[in-house]
Amino acid sequence: MTTTLIWILVVLVAVGLYLSWTAGRLDRLHARIDAARAALDAQLLRRASVAQELATAGVLDPAASIVLYEAAHAARQAEEELREVAESELSQALRAVFAEPQLVDALREAPGGEAAAHELAEAVRRVPMARRFHNDAVGAARRLREHRKVRWFRLAGHAPFPLAFEMDDESPAALVERAA
Amino acid sequence: MRIGIVCPYSWDVPGGVQFHIRDLAEYFIRLGHEVSVLAPADDDTPLPPYVVSAGRAVPVPYNGSVARLNFGFLSAARVRRWLHEGAFDVIHIHEPTSPSLGLLTCWAAQGPIVATFHTSNPRSRAMIAAYSILQAALEKISARIAVSEYARRTLVEHLGGDAVVIPNGVDVGFFAGAEPRPEWQGDTIGFIGRIDESRKGLPVLMRALPAILAARPQTRLLVAGRGDEEEAVERLSKELRTRVEFLGMISDEDKARLLRSVDLYVAPNTGGESFGIILVEAMSAGAPVLASDLDAFAQVLDQGSAGELFPNEDADALAEAAVRLLADPERRTALRDRGSAHVRRFDWSTVGADILSVYETVTAGAAAVATDDRATGLRARFGLARD
């Protein structure tokens, strides 16, 4: 009788430890998502700011300036649920404006243009990176949360189900093509 | 930035991953970053100042061959001490799925962790089982880098999630500036790689050689690499053997000079390649490249526009393409020019900057790397851990 009790106790403790370890894993994943999301926000904001700066600097023609300004402004002001669309539109606007290599060259020749072009290229290159890292973390958390042990024991607590950030982040080829 | 790099393979054994890490570390040091590399090494091996030894690696049968790996309490303790003393802003683990230092570090650390996946293994049952065990450790990696689109695909299939593709780097200037050697010039074909490792493809080239020499008898084949030279040429006739020169193991300088000298570089590898750094080196040195159409090679050669491809293991196609290229100096010049422009994206200045932007993306706003006390097990959980 007592041996059975002891065994039941041992199994309960083992299960408890395993669940606590899984909860720790999940907690770490949620923290990773938060960090990745903050990094993604920072890169998106940086991209929109540089685009807006370029649009108002007077180095581009007026039509291109307006297109770029509009898109950058919309991306910065977008509500959370419309953010993905607005950021995708900024990507499209950047691709449209910097479609011609000549325009990029002209931008580089303008005073301060070299630095601005470099800054924009850096931002445009890092957005897909940050997004990929974010979605990678989201995917890992989702796979773990869909597991039975997590659902049955509600190990995720009240943390919202993580969502991937989906957007068009294709960069303008003429801008990121370096040294070539 | 304080950067910690973990090398899973013995520092004293030359290999692609080790060279990659050495060049990466030296690139960052030149930029003024503080770099420490943790690598397995014998205690009496002379190490560069930035390398910390994690102890001797133990030879164990793993993945079909004998691998030299680090595991156990001693290695784990060294990893923890290195993490503790280094106080890194970011750690960069190479090959985190091999059961060695990379995995131990993943287990012991928390904070911004970047990992590079070099291999692209075919999907296997053992791998899938292993990955599900590894998952908990791999979940800590905040940014994954794959060395090619092909390696990324393998990674996505096996592990889920995603990775950014950053190719391996090459010091393009070193190869482009090498002095050609006259005795290696004039209708020469180059091959660099282990002679006795059949996946490097020398047997395919040997089968193609009679046809090449029949069309162009003045051609010479220069072979650089370790292995049994007698065995490699045993299928060739006496006269043909005189057209093959074995150079044995050569230094980096001679490798660059060889690539600068030859009229055609042939890479007949039959499989198991995830990147193909030698193709980039050959293109940097301005050698026209003819390679088998492995996924990884096709990608490095821009689907055949920066170098020619032939169907894998097809000796006749190899011979036909080699004869055509050797007889067509204009096509070779075009390939040279195209190749030299194409390799700029593989230069350390580009690759290093990309890796640094990955570091900056994951460290922005994050705390520095620390040892993960949760992972040490029950002691920590019950508050009994020593500080």
Image (spheres, coloured by chain):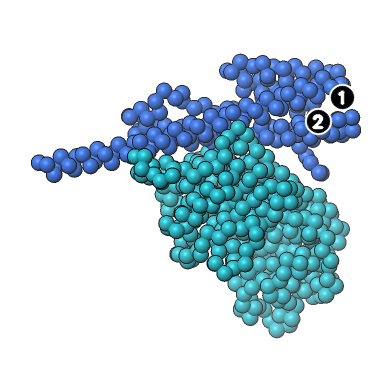
Residue type at numbered disc 2: Ala
A30 versus B134 height, above or below: above
Label 1 resides on the chain identified as A
Residue B48, how many percent across, how many down?
Answer: 65, 61
Residue situated in front as seen by the camera: A175 or A168: A175
Residue found at x 52% / y 31%: A33
- The local crowd at label 1, few if under 14, some if 14 to 19, many if 20 or more residues have their Cα within 10 Å, is some
Quadrant hosting residue A26? top left
Label 2 resides on the chain identified as A
Disc assigned to residue B50: none
For label 2, the residue is: A116
Q: Nearer the viewer, mark 2 or mark 1?
A: 2
The quadrant the C terminus of chain B occupies is top left
Helix, strand or loop under label 1: loop
Residue found at x 66% / y 16%: A77
Distance between the Cα atoms at labels 2 and 1? 10 Å
Using the rendered image of the protein, determine whether residue B312 is visible from the camera's viewpoint: no
Disc assigned to residue A59: 1
Residue found at x 64% / y 73%: B226
What is chain B's hue in the picture? cyan
Residue found at x 70% / y 84%: B238
Furthest toward the bottom, the residue is: B238
Residue A94, how many percent across, how many down?
Answer: 75, 26
Residue situated in front as seen by the camera: A158 or B73: B73
Residue B315, how many percent across, how many down?
Answer: 66, 66
Letter of the chain in blue: A
Residue type at numbered disc 1: Val
Left or right: B93 as drawn, with respect to B306: left
Residue B331, how many percent across, how many down?
Answer: 83, 57
> Do tag 2 and tag 1 residues touch (Cβ < 8 Å)?
yes
Residue situated in front as seen by the camera: A28 or B262: A28
